[in-house]
Structures are given as structure tokens and as C-alpha cells.
């Protein structure tokens, strides 16, 4: 089973009332939904869900969105969630640590971590005037070395 992201466009045009939007979002709530209006003025919903195949994902998206927006689906675009994230420019953000947590993982003092940062022995990003953020993976690699 794989996660897919689908955008389904329906024939419906015109403004939706707040109640219609709320009802559609309630129907789609389990699918991380977003609603939009296409350049042609049709309503569309983007959803993410698990399916066994891209074909099953396309059929599921069409049925779910058709029910939620109470209109006939006229277009369905489906891709893996990973591909959708790449196209959206999503970037995995590494897990970050503060100096205190880095010191604990390295088995050194907070002052030593600050000294390592100043000496360029470990990378860190300054947050504000006095705080730093370090990537967990780098700190763990340094601790293992």
C-alpha cells in the first residue's frame, strides 16, 4: 500500500456557501484536503490517501471528491505522495537540537559545544542573539566518531 495525492476537478462552478465548504471539508477530513477553484472556474479538491495502485487511487479520488463536492468529476490527476511533495518543493527539515541536548548527546558541557561551534568543529545555525540549532544527525555522527 502506498500513499497517493490526487486533485479531482468537478463540473461545478460558481461560489460555494460557507455551509457547502464546511460539508465538503467534513467529507474529506480524513484525506488532508484542500479546496480550490481552477483557472476555468471549476471547483477542485486535493486529497492524500493510501491505495494499492495508482488506478485504485484515481477511482477512489473520483468517488470521494464527487460525493464531497456533489458534482461530476471531469478531471483527476494522481501521483505518489512523494512525487507530489517534490513538485510542491517540499523539503524534509532535519530534526534540530539545542546546545543543551547536543551537549548531552556528545557527553560534553554546554560551554564545550559552544566552543566547538566557534571553532567550526560542528555546524550550527544561530537563532536569535545567543541560541543555536544543530542538526541531530550531525551531532549523532560526531558522537559516534
Image: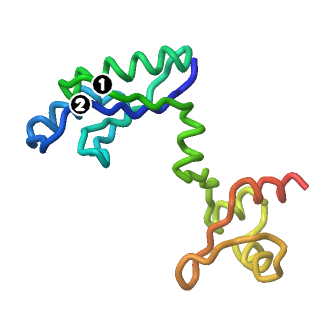
Give residue 42's position: percent from left, percent from top: 25, 39
Which colouring convention does the figure follow? rainbow
**Which residue of the protein is positioned furthest toward the right in this rendering?**
145
Q: Position of residue 35 (x, y in %)?
A: 28, 41
Give the labeled residue for mark 1: 73
Residue located beneath label 2 in the image: 11
Contact check, label 1 and label 2, Cβ < 8 Å: yes
Up-down: is 81 above or below 141?
above
Residue at 50% x, 18% y: name it. Answer: 51
The residue sitting at 39% across, 17% down in the picture is 60
**Identity of the residue drawn at 16% across and 38% down:** 21
Above or below residue 25? Residue 114 is below
Question: Which sits in the foreground, 136 or 42?
Answer: 42
The residue carrying pointer 1 sits among few (fewer than 14), some (14 to 19) or many (20 or more) residues within 10 Å by Cα, namely many
Which SS class for mark 1?
strand
Picture coordinates of residue 37, whole percent (x, y): 27, 45
Q: Quadrant of the image for the N terminus?
A: top right
Q: Which comes before the other along the chain, label 1 or label 2? A: 2
Q: In the picture, residue 80 is in which quadrant?
A: top right
Amino acid at each position: 500500500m502506498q500513499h497517493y495525492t490526487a486533485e479531482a476537478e468537478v463540473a461545478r462552478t460558481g461560489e460555494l456557501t460557507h455551509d457547502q465548504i464546511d460539508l465538503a471539508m467534513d467529507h474529506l477530513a480524513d484525506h488532508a484536503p484542500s479546496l480550490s477553484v481552477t483557472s476555468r472556474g471549476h471547483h477542485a479538491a486535493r486529497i492524500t490517501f493510501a491505495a494499492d495502485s495508482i488506478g485504485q487511487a484515481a477511482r477512489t479520488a473520483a468517488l470521494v471528491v464527487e460525493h464531497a463536492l456533489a458534482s461530476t468529476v471531469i478531471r483527476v490527476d494522481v501521483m505518489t505522495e512523494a512525487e507530489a511533495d517534490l513538485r510542491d518543493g517540499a523539503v524534509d527539515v532535519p530534526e534540530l537540537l539545542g546546545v543543551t541536548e547536543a551537549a548531552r548527546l556528545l557527553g560534553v558541557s554546554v560551554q564545550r559545544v559552544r566552543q566547538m561551534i566557534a571553532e567550526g568543529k560542528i555546524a550550527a545555525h544561530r537563532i536569535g542573539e545567543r541560541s543555536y540549532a544543530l542538526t541531530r544527525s550531525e551531532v549523532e555522527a560526531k558522537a559516534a566518531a
